[in-house]
Image (tube, rainbow, N blue to C red):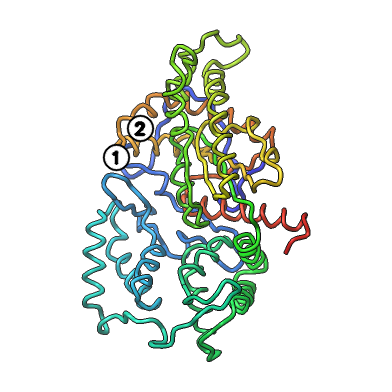
Amino acid sequence: MVRSTAVSSEDPSRREAEGPPAVPDGSGRSQGELSRFEAGRGSTGAPGSESVAASEGEEGAAGVRVRVDDGGVLRPFMRGILVHSLTELGFSFEDAYAVAQEVWRRVRDRMVVRRDELRALVAELTRSAPGGDFERLDPTPGERLDVLGKDGRWPFSKGRLQQSLLAAGLDPRDAFEAVFEIERELHAQGERRVARDVIRRLANEILTRRFGEAYARRYLAWRYFQNEDERPLVLLLGGTSGVGKSSLALEVARRLSIARVLSTDSIRDVMRVMVSEDLVPTLHVSSFEAHTRLVSPADGDHDPVVEGFLEQSRTISVGVRAAIDRSILEGTNTAIDGVSLVPGLFDPSGWGDGAHVVFLLAADEDRESLYAHLVARAHGRGARASERYVRNFQQIVRIQEHLLERAETFGVPVVDVQDLELAAQEVVIRVVDRIAERHAQEGRA
């Protein structure tokens, strides 16, 4: 089976599911307080760089990842995102990073911090900071850079360049630093109008020097895809219920500027309106409950939970194929996530030259981690639905086991989702590498 190397070097053994596992953490906290984002992770495997968690120390003294309570939804605290927000407001990178460091120093011993508390803390620090007021100007006041290309002239955009660097597989902080280094070198050249190809060559040089040739190749491949390749990207991200694939799909979509994000749940809801429960009973329940609506009992050699799930997935796959065809017709980059994306039901090569269709499976093979994540979700927004996940944990695990077996059979890469940041980075790398490989096979740049 293809396994994630960027996220984890371990291949956890699978254990028989005979009941909800205990979730010991040695902290005395209740299971409802646990989250997949609490454990620290290792290196991303990037030459010369470490993961955001490792390089920025996003864990507190007790090894617990600080989380932000955003209206009941718990998200990992990331200094890189805060730095990006401040630079977008006009702060210099150095000042934005200093603010983020001070915010981290004040919250690192807490397990959860509310979003409004973070906003108030940032406001306090940016109004009165040690050493005086923070700069709210660009690095060279009054000297705007313009970019020249075949489609005209436009102002140099740090945000647009940063998106391209994220697509190379960099973590956010490394991407921010590279952008400011590129901008400084452009200003040092003394030209106020710079050809797009000059920026591309400079970015390639800096990426090669600081992070290695693989990152530079991905950057160039992504720029070529954006500017020269008319085929859209369609990312299919499967995974069992509650594993975190929707959050992962949204984060990847942000990094790759994917305009449309769909879920198989929404496709299923539309199909429910069109297809009656009498006609297709399994369509009208959750994936882990579909076995209760099987018209014919499963064969004695087959798991009824899996058989019900597959029957539902085959029905929903009709709607998924229609969504992919629509994306190709419109030329719109699209990410589709959902449990109904089953290896073997979708062949990415079936869309031929119409699109770059990439199929990945999100999984958490550590049952204690998966169970703890479901419990944590049951205490936030959407708690009623999450409680159903907890009650049906054994069925969810059985479905994941079957998905993993099919992923091995059909060669679908598996991404470990225990750390969202690293998982997003790995998905980006796999997607852009796949596009680059196809360009190379076709003799493109």
Residue drawn at x 40%, y 39% as measured from the top left:
373
In the image, taking residue 390 as reference, residue 440 lies left or right, namely right
What is the crowding at mark 1: few (fewer than 14 residues within 10 Å), some, or many (at least 20)?
Answer: some
Position of residue 150 relative to residue 1, above or below, is: below
Residue drawn at x 43%, y 34% as measured from the top left:
266
- Residue 88 location, x and y as percent? 37, 70
Residue drawn at x 39%, y 62% as measured from the top left:
81
- Choose between 430 and 337: the one closer to the eye: 337
Q: Which mark is residue 380?
A: 1
Q: Could you tell me which secondary element the residue under label 1 belongs to? A: loop
> Of the residues under marks 2 and 1, which one precedes in the sequence?
1
User: Can residue 348 be seen here?
Assistant: yes
Quadrant of the image occupied by residue 351: top right
Q: Which mark is residue 386?
A: 2
Position of residue 216 relative to residue 292, above or below, is: below
Q: Which mark is residue 236?
A: none
User: Can residue 1 be seen here?
Assistant: no
Position of residue 275 relative to residue 412, above or below, is: above
- Residue 216 location, x and y as percent? 64, 68
Q: Residue furthest bottom?
A: 190
Q: Could you tell me which secondary element the residue under label 2 belongs to? A: helix
- Residue 399 location, x and y as percent? 53, 27
What is the crowding at mark 2: few (fewer than 14 residues within 10 Å), some, or many (at least 20)?
Answer: many
Position of residue 77 relative to residue 139, above or below, is: above
- Residue 401 location, x and y as percent? 57, 29
- Cα separation, mark 2 vs mark 1, equals 9 Å
- Choose between 59 and 28: the one closer to the eye: 59
Labels 2 and 1 touching (C-beta < 8 A): yes
